[in-house]
Amino acid sequence: MLSLIYSCGLRCGELLALQPVHIDSKRNIVLLKNAKGKKDRIVPLSPKILDMLREYYSLYKPKKYLFEGQVAGVPYDSRSLQQVLKQASHKAQLTKPATLHWLRHSYATHLLESGTDLRYIQELLGHNSSKTTEIYTHVSTKSIQQIKKSILMICKIKIKMYI
C-alpha cells in the first residue's frame, strides 16, 4: 500500500477506494475514479509495483476493494494504514516523522527533481490550480545544490577573466 501511494502520488482515500478493475496492467496505469473534487484521473503504474500487486492479489484475492480490511468487501481502514506507515518508519529507523501525505509530497518532489514539467505534475496529482502544485513541490536540496554549482562555475570563469 505504501509503495503504491508513493509510486503513484496517491492520496490515502484514493488508495483505499481502489478496486482491482482500476488497475490496467496492459497499459500500466491506475484509474482513479471520483478522486478529490469528484474527478477521474489516470496515473502511470511502475512495472515493479504491478508485479507487487499481482503477488498481493494472488495471496489475498480481494473481493471488491484492492485493499480490504478484515471483512471481505470492506475497504482497509485509514487509521490502520497510518499505523502501517508508523511501524514501517520505526522499522526503517526514520528520525523524522512520516505521514501518508509525505509520501505523495515525495513523489511530486522526485518528479520535479528529475525534470518533470510542473504542469504534468499538476495533472498527475489532480490539482485544479498550478498554485497548489507550486506550494506542494518545495524547492529541493538537489536544485539548491545545482544552483550552488552554477554560481561557483560563474565565479571561476570571472576569476579566470581577471587573471
Image (cartoon, helix red, strand yellow):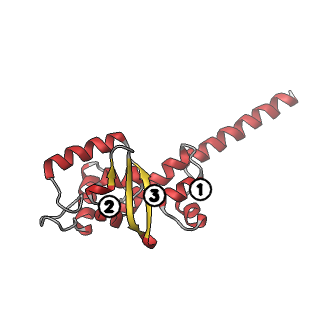
Q: Amino acid at mark 2?
A: Leu
In the rendered structure, the answer to whether residue 161 lies left or right of residue 57 reads right
Q: Residue at x 31, y 54 (%)?
A: 2
User: Disc 3 designates what residue?
Assistant: 105
Where residue 59 sits: x, y (%)? 14, 48
Numbered tag placed on residue 11 in the rendering: none
Q: Nearer the viewer, residue 50 or 113?
A: 50
**Nearer-N-terminus badge (1/3):** 3
- The residue located at (18%, 68%) in the rendering is 74
- Dot 2 falls on a residue whose secondary structure is helix
* Side (left or right) of 24 relative to 159: left
Instruction: Give the residue type at disc 1.
Output: Arg
Instruction: Inspect this view and state whether residue 128 appears.
Output: yes
Q: Residue furthest right?
A: 162
Residue underneath mark 2: 15
Q: Is residue 142 above or below residue 61?
A: above
Image coordinates of residue 80 in percent, x first then y, are 22, 65
C-alpha distance separating marks 1 and 3? 16 Å
Mark 3 vs 2, N-terminal side: 2
Q: Nearer the viewer, residue 157 or 38?
A: 38
How crowded pointer 1 is (Cα within 10 Å; few <14, some 14-19, many 20+) is rated as some
Q: Amino acid at mark 3?
A: His
